[in-house]
Image (cartoon, helix red, strand yellow):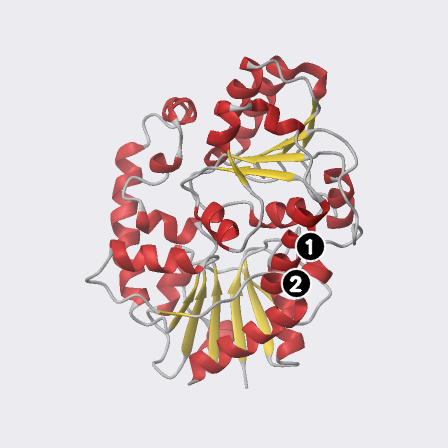
Amino acid sequence: MKITHLATDEKFIGHAHDTFEDAFPDCNSFLIFGPKEWKYIPVDNANYKSVKKRYIPHGYFWNELKNSDVVIIHFLHIYFAWLVLFLPKKVNVVWIGWGGDYYSRIFPFYPANILLAKTQRYCGEAHKGWEPLHWALKRVHEFIFWRAIKKIKIFSPVLESEHKVLEAYYPRNRIPSYAPWNYGELERHFISGIENKRVLKSGVVIGNSAFPSNNHLEVFDVLAKHNVSRPILLPLAYGDVGYKEHIKSVAAEVFGDSVNVVDQFMPVEQYNRLLLNYDSMIINACRQQALGNIIVALYIGAKVFVREESPVYAFFKNKGVTIFTVEMLEKDLTLLDLALTDEQVEKAREALLDCWGRKSILLKTKQLINAVLG
């Protein structure tokens, strides 16, 4: 069997490689689009191949695609959607979604729909003048996306509820069948270096990246209004460069020396050890986001605050995990002082193991391929 993966240089791709190779040894090749100056992907692994020409089917990589039994798309970039249009019918296509690639279909004015008022005002000023071009490109992308969707057999979003939302928004369009699959194995990829450890100090992690969808500015206002003086961690290692600099500047003005900014990629073990110093995490995203960070925070017994409308909140609540909303925190800042019980932390770890444990992820991987070939 031949499984070909379409991906870009992103940190999750190594997780996918490990899992698919364990489930289907020597069956996988990863075509990485973009120049071979990779930041996250090991350049010495023969399973990864660099593809420089993004838009024109050509040569070796096109033969690799059309002769595959399964093609797995990691995030449906517009150029991946365009390539799907040319694939032979015999090729079975799987789309593993990340969020940004399908939330833009759910929300007609994305990303404005997922930005809160203050963040939206900043972004509106920062991108003024681009609106006509943005909407013209969006129309073209929509046309290509829905043509490609018809050739995709399986769609695996981060959470099952997101598949149902996409179906509800587009009842007349054919949405590919759902199959569960997630990046990363808890034991190997998420809790490396912090096995069985608990948070050590009091502090607050805000957001997971330098994307406006984190709505950092609104969190800053809540904490500043109540004179919260504990250490602040801002993970800004990837995202929008202009937004990152703005958030760093505002954070320094509001919180002074209590802010620790992580704006460069950090090995997972080092980052995990850093998180042990912060017993609260605030993810102020209106959509599903930062699940990897949330998994680690729940494992070490930190309090996690997400927006009530985020599907992440309902997902963990339904599994019996203790999780809070940002709206709760706005009403009661003393929640930052709360310590989770041993029973609450153990319940969270059991739920995480059930969803992201090695046995569970390997089983999902085998079932995914069986489903697309069935």
For label 1, the SS is: helix
Q: Residue at x 42, y 56 (%)?
A: 77
Q: Could one spot residue 169 in this view of the protein?
A: yes
Pick the quarter of the image with the C terminus: bottom left
Q: Could one spot residue 69 in this view of the protein?
A: no
Task: Give the amino acid at mark 2.
Answer: Glu
Residue under label 2: 185
Q: Is residue 265 above or below residue 205?
A: below
Residue 167 in percent (x, y) is at 29, 60
Quadrant hosting residue 153: bottom left
Q: Is residue 348 above or below residue 374?
A: above
Left or right of residue 159, residue 354 in this image: right
Q: Residue at x 69, y 53 (%)?
A: 346
Task: Give the amino acid at mark 1.
Answer: Phe
Residue 109 in percent (x, y) is at 29, 39
Contact (Cβ within 8 Å) of mark 2 with mark 1: yes
Residue under label 1: 190
Q: Is residue 229 above or below residue 161?
A: above
Q: Residue at x 38, y 53 (%)?
A: 102
Residue 331 numbered tag: none
Quadrant hosting residue 351: bottom right
Query: Which mark is first along the chain, 1 or 2?
Result: 2
Pick the quarter of the image with the N terminus: bottom right
